[in-house]
Amino acid sequence: MQSLTILAAADVIGILLGAVGGLVVGVAVFWAIQRVTGKSHIQAAKQQAETVVHDARLQAENILKTTQLEAKSDAIKRREEFEKETTEVRNELRETERHLSKREDMVDRKWESINTKERELENRDKKSAEKERELANKDKQLTNTLTEQRAQLLRIANITVEEAKEILLSRLEDEVTHEASNLVERVVNKAKEEADSRSREITLNAIQRYAAEHTCDNTVSTVDIPNDDMKGRVIGREGRNIRAFEKSTGVDVIIDDTPGVVVVSAFDPIRREVARISLDKLIQDGRIHPARIEEIVAETQKELDGKIIEIGKRVTLETNVNGLSSKLLPYLGRLSYRTSYGQNVLRHSVEVAFLSQSMAEELGLDGALARRCGLLHDIGKAVDHEIEGGHPEIGAELARKLKESPTVINAIAAHHGDVPATTPYAPLISAADAMSASRPGARRETLERYIKRLESLEAIANGFDGIKQAFAIQAGREIRVIVDPEFVDDSTAWKIARDIAKKVEDELTYPGEIKITLLREVRCTEYAR
């Protein structure tokens, strides 16, 4: 407050000094005017000077009053601010004091708790020391007792300590070996039972989760024609049109007496599809000559190339396989025009992808990686018409060139057992491949091939000694063999069944598996007369 009063007084003094200065200036002006104008104007100047002085005095009084009021207001304001700050500081000090008081109470309680725990620990230490002394005494007594008993046993048995140790260790070794053998046998049997049960469960779950269409593709390409006159136009004068068409497409065009149909034959499915579409366009257009044939074939080839890439893209989206090289997409699309026993290879690859993912996830493996391996496992079939070798080897080499992971490469190469499996994904792909190929409706055979396979199965079974009859049943999925019980006993029957299965595996090619059922029936007939 004292500093505020001093500041206000200084302001008042400054105002008074300003008023006095104004008075002095007025007097100086008055004297200057008096000197200039002379005595005739003295009276007027004097009156003017008095007016100036009077105005200056009134102004000084007003300024002084205003300054005093402002100084009082400022002093009141500063006092209020000071009191507010003082109140806040006091509140903070009180709050700090309360916190310190609480912390002091907490410290006191903790200190009391620590003292209590220290006393408890001291009591426990004392009890532990007493127990240790008791245990030491008991240990000493036990040692003495064992020594006495050992001496008595040695006197009774008339053997040394080393001999007793050897006998004891020998008995323990025999017991442990016997128990270990039993334990190993139980563990192995249990593991086999659990493995069989778990594998069946995983396989059934995978099959149930992915239900695919039970259909197969037709591998014969035919083109419908409106009338038999169109056959002549397709052949052309002296066969020039059909020769130009076969040269441009690389296929064989079969035109026989079958009404309304022209057959396109080719080993390469892509060429066959290009030829089929081109011939259909030519028939619809009506202009069939060598130049038009070349133009249509080139146009169709370009369209089919684009369609193949689109098919590859759709399949990657359907299976959610990301990060594939763009060079792999045409190969995937080409699989759409490739069949195996009538089964579309691309749809088969999609089935294998999802089946592999399902089984991998059941086993705690990476489902996405298994799906990728399954989708690419038959990629070699897209080019096996052009490159020598089996499709697993071709597909693995193609995947290696396009920077696929070693796991994917091994799964492709090993899914038919051509190379050893180095990862758990290769057996999964092999199992999923067999499941997709052997399910009902997946594949079909021509009638001639089907009959030939049944005859081969029966011939193999009848080739063994002691066989009376053999029948291929269940569409070639099972062989029912009946043996002569006079020449074949029970143990020999098992051996014949294994030998038949081994010979079927070595000599025939078939999807899935074939069951060998051997029957040995003994009939005893007597007559009562």
Image: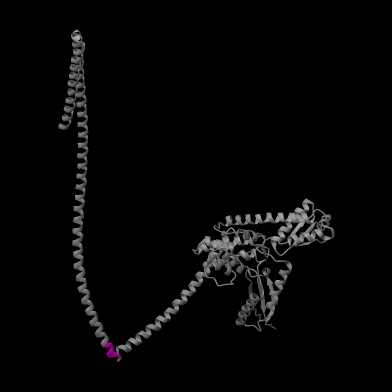
Residue nearest the viewer, comparing 446 with 492:
446
Magenta residues span 152-157
In-image side of 324 versus 262 (left or right)? left
Give above or below for 97 relative to 435.
Answer: above
Residue 170 sits inside the magenta stretch: no
Q: Quadrant of residue 120?
A: bottom left
Residue nearest the viewer, comparing 496 with 29:
29
Q: Position of residue 112 (x, y in %)?
A: 18, 56
Colouring scheme applied when the structure was drawn: one colour
> Which residue lies most toward the left here?
2
Residue nearest the viewer, comparing 300 with 22:
22
In-image side of 190 versus 243 (left or right)? left
Q: Quadrant of residue 508?
A: bottom right
Q: Position of residue 475 (x, y in %)?
A: 68, 68
Q: Position of residue 286 (x, y in %)?
A: 79, 51
User: Can residue 172 be seen from the camera position used here?
Assistant: yes
Query: Where, quadrant-wise, is the C terminus in this rendering?
Result: bottom right
